[in-house]
Amino acid sequence: MQHTIDLTVAFVQDRLKFAESGHDWWHIQRVWNNTKLILQSEQADNIVCELAALLHDIADSKFHDGDETIGPRVAGEFLASIGVDKLMVEHVQQIILNMSFKASLGEISFHSKELEIVQDADRLDAIGAIGIARAFNYGGYKNREIYNPSIKPIKHQNKEEYKNTSAPTINHFYEKLLLLKDKMNTATAKGLAEQRHAFMEKYLQQFYAEWEGKC
Ligand code: ADP
Ligand code: NI
């Protein structure tokens, strides 16, 4: 099975050679590491989890007219080509299809412990120190203000509205990042998320204090 993982790593690294920085190989490597950390204290099929973590962002639907079937299809073709068992391929495909934030907004149609773990691993990469870096990187790419005290965070009704906002990056903390802790599926990820969440809270306190010239 180590050979299957090695081949998959090489495939994903090659596919993501020119990926944008929010979903590049380093994001995949972090999600894979988070997955392995969660698996140290959760019972599941490790190979399915690792393969899904490695393949979960190979074809971001944002760059394919919102087509969420491309990722699972490419992943399935690859896994079949290296001889992975059909049932395992199907499970990995289901995980990739169902783990997006959109799916978690109510369109989810599949459940498994393995999906829960990889989804948690992906969400952990959106919070804490890494999450802060990714948010400001995204905001910079979009040329957003870092903060504007007169623009208040809002509760978004759907993914499109959330994607099309031009709000300052600090608002993203209240609109998504600080909500992720309570969306964790597994007890292990909840524990990890608590620490990362506390770090973000502390960061925000310091941010406002500096903004107001209080320290
Ligand atoms: P996912 O891969 O979970 O669907 P997204 O594509 O929504 O994630 O976002 C990728 C990264 O960019 C995440 O770390 C996310 O927090 C960040 N991001 C997304 N939208 C915004 C935004 N409006 N402001 C700041 N950061 C954002
Ligand atoms: Ni991801």
Image: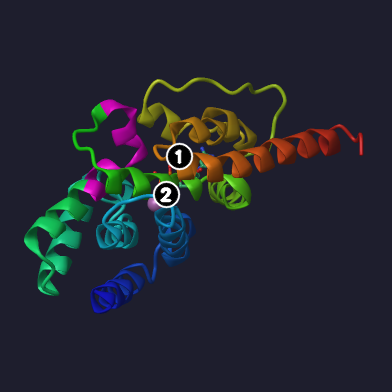
Residue 116 appears at what percent x and percent y?
A: 33, 43
For badge 2, the amino acid type reads Asp
- Comparing 172 with 185, the one in front is 185
Q: Mark 1 points at which residue?
A: 187
What scheme was used to colour the molecule?
Answer: rainbow
- Left or right: residue 188 versus residue 73 is right
Label 2: which secondary element: helix
On screen, 48 above or below 193?
below
Q: Which of marks 2 and 1 is in front?
A: 1
Q: Quadrant of residue 28?
A: bottom left
Query: Does 105 lie within the magenta span?
Result: yes
Asked if the beta carbon under badge 2 is closer than 8 A to the nearest atom of ligand 2, the reply is yes
What residue sits 92% from the left and 39% below the top? 215
From this viewpoint, which residue is outermost toward the left? 86
Where residue 148 appears, x then y in whole percent?
A: 70, 30
The type of residue carrying mark 1 is Ala
